[in-house]
Amino acid sequence: MNLIFLGPPGAGKGTIATLAAKHYGIPHISSGQLFRKHIEQETDLGLAISALMESGDLVPDTLTVSLIDQRLSKADAQNGFILDGFPRTIVQAKALQELTEVDLVINLNLDKEQILSRLSGRRYCKSTGRTYHIIYNPPKVDGIDDETGEALIQRDDDQPEAILHRLEVYEDQTFPLIDYYRSRNLLVDIDAAPAPEVIFTALKAELNQRLELG
Ligand code: AP5
């Protein structure tokens, strides 16, 4: 089962993809998380893209497609995957088409007010990528990751100015993918406003209906 999770910043792509990957036993591949690892490890790629990511701009298509190509060629992705945050441009969608088949595109819908509330309250663990929210999904101990005990941090691109810029970039460059995939009869719209468990139940029902899965 090859799935894409589409949606604006903060819609909950990573949160729902984590639940789905565990349930279906397929890898959750987040382009943003792969890039953040490169930045943390100060690789050549990480050094080249850190300013772009901090401001909320997209990484160039060629670099992004190459990163995803490498990740999809790994053994664990041969029986399915969830792509979270990729593709994000029509160029990337066309490149993905050359790499592999896509079974379904899950489009998570959320209004701007809730997006801002989710992103401004998000905290994350740098080493694992585990994500929390100060109100909706707090850690057991304030500011500390439940499993590693590390201090939680706020992403640089979750600062107010960068959030607004990411939303503009989404509207301009990623929103057109909705029509791109709808016209190919691959798009499923899901309301991302309820609690994660409710969204995940709706997702399972859609997958069951469209792909005949449990
Ligand atoms: P990326 O990491 O992909 O960021 P994004 O798309 O902006 O998405 P987010 O990770 O911000 O949000 P999400 O939808 O996963 O929400 P989450 O589950 O965390 O990309 C970052 C950057 O990397 C880009 O700006 C770009 O520079 C670069 N990049 C990445 N991919 C690229 C590509 N393909 N091409 C070019 N550049 C690329 O949830 C958000 C918060 O809400 C959390 O706190 C969570 O706990 C909470 N929450 C989630 N669901 C719910 C719920 N149902 N109810 C209440 N709270 C919830």
Image: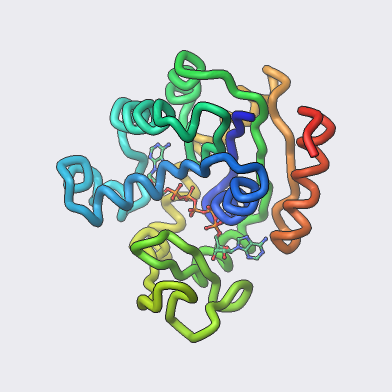
Quarter placement of the C terminus: top right
Residue shown at the point (75%, 50%) measured from the top left: 191
Residue drawn at 66 percent across, 55 percent down: 111
Of the pair 46 and 156, the residue shown nearer to us: 46
Name the residue rendered at 57%, 35% in the picture.
175
Quadrant where the N terminus is found in the figure: top right
* Residue 115 lies in quadrant: bottom right
Q: Is residue 60 above or below residue 126?
A: above
Task: Point out residue 9 in the picture as x, y percentages from the top left corner.
Answer: 52, 51
Nearer-the-camera pick, 191 or 207: 207
Q: How many marks?
A: 0
Residue 163 lies, in percent from the top left, at: 45, 58
Q: Is residue 70 visible?
A: yes
Identify which residue, 172 or 94, lies in the foreground. 94
From the top left corner, tell me how far across and down residue 28 is, in percent: 52, 44
* Residue 173 visible to an observer of this rendering: no
Residue most extreme to the front = 75
Left or right position of 171 against 71: right
Q: Residue 205, how many percent across, how many down?
A: 82, 42
Residue at position x 51%, y 17% from top?
Answer: 97
Nearest to the observer: residue 116 or residue 44: 44
In the displayed structure, would residue 188 be above or below residue 185? below
The answer to whether 152 is drawn above or below residue 200 in the figure is below
